[in-house]
Image: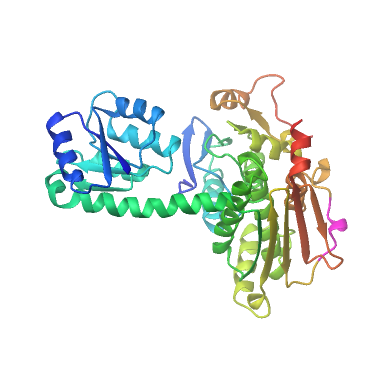
Amino acid sequence: MGDSRLFRTEIRGDTLVVVALGNISSLAGNDADEAFDKMTLSLEGQELKNVVIDLGHAEYFGTLMIELLHRLWRAVRDHAGRMAICNVSDLGREILNVSKLDHLWEICPSREEALGAIDHRPGKLPQSR
Amino acid sequence: MTAILVVDDVALDRRLVGEFLGRDDKLKVEFAEDGAEALDQLARRVPDLIVTDLVMPRVDGLELVTTVRTKYPLVPVVLMTSQGSEDIAVRALQQGAASYVPKRLLADDLLGMVQKVLSLSTKERVATRLMGCMSHNQCAFVLGNDTAMFAPLIAYLQESLSHMGLCDENDCTRIGVALEEALTNALYHGNLQVGSELRGVDDAAYRALIHERCTAAPYRDRRIFVEASLSSKNAEFVIRDEGVGFDPSKLPDPTDPANLEKASGRGILLMRTFMDEVVFNDVGNFVKLTKSRAAAEDVKR
């Protein structure tokens, strides 16, 4: 669901894990859009409601990736789910920080912590600020 | 004399390869018994080319190729393949080995292959040294509405910046991100006049409009003009599109909490973050991005 040359997906319980397979530049265009079309479709079912984005293979990304993250976020939010991002590089972190998107999404150092962060634990709700 | 390092764990094979290569008296052949010994030798003296077996103890041919590509990228590696080593050979070629010769054809083909690879790599080494002598690069490009040329253009500009020592690898990457954003803005928002408003509201309609405009006059005939002036002290990029322009001051602040989920303005935010200066003309269809070495060094201090 959404696997392509740019992304791989895995399912962990009710969470869709999206793994970027390399840098996602703003030139990725249709390939990235189509992959995310499939991912958002899969979130419209009842089985999946949360998303973890693993950026461990992506040294950087551009505004296209940010827009795609927003698409997933809207789908997740529509189903009262949660979204977290993990394994972000220093440059990726800089991009998220300067865009203030670290206020919108939980950013975790590892995939396991991201999966833990979207559990329903008190004080861990990722709220839009 | 051109130094060749032959790596094979079988003494007889090493001797035979030495004889085949010895037919060219301009080649000086040295030997290593496996990849680990080869890497020890490389640390002391870098050869001009490596000929290696694949299946060896300690460090095998695949690991040798991978390490050489990382640490000694200008040293080509030629593989000697045998039946049963095809999978490793494919992976080694994917990792960057220059070529291969089956062991059963070494007598006829190895010397010719080594000479051919040496000739190509010598050209590459000389070109790299020449690029290191570049003091100034001024260039201009005219692009159509096709992102296919954006990545190679950015790679070319980054390579020039790197060779001239204006910035390190991290800053080169940042400049690349800024250029990507500027070029995609010039294409989608400039030439094709597709605004960000649809993005996030109706992505399918956004993509459909882009597709429609790519084939419709006047949008499809518009060009993107890129000029770069690069030196070891300063890089200046000018990107101009043929659209109607816009007023950057009217863009919403993408960092305002009310706008965090909107698509507008983020590309320019990244441009301003990664470049020292971003200036638009009055019309808004021309942007100049500047990065200077002095500013980069100040930030690091």
Determine whether, in the image, residue B70 is placed left or right of residue B223. Answer: left
In the depicted structure, whether residue A25 falls above or below residue A88: below
Residue drawn at x 59%, y 69% is B211
Does the image show residue B200?
no
Residue drawn at x 64%, y 68% is B209
Write down the quadrant of residue B189 in the picture: bottom right
The stretch of residues the image draws in magenta is: B246-252
Residue that protrudes farthest toward the top in the picture: A122
Quarter in which the C terminus of chain B is drawn: top right
Picture colour scheme: rainbow
Considering depth in this image, is B216 or B88 the residue closer to the camera? Answer: B88
Considering depth in this image, is B16 or B215 the residue closer to the camera? Answer: B16
In the depicted structure, whether residue B141 falls above or below residue B181: below
Tell me where residue A117 appears, x and y as whole percent: 62, 24
Residue that protrudes farthest toward the bottom in the picture: B217
Determine whether, in the image, residue A57 is placed left or right of residue B247. Answer: left
Examine the structure image and report whether residue A97 is included in the region drawn in magenta. Answer: no
Quarter in which the N terminus of chain B is drawn: top left
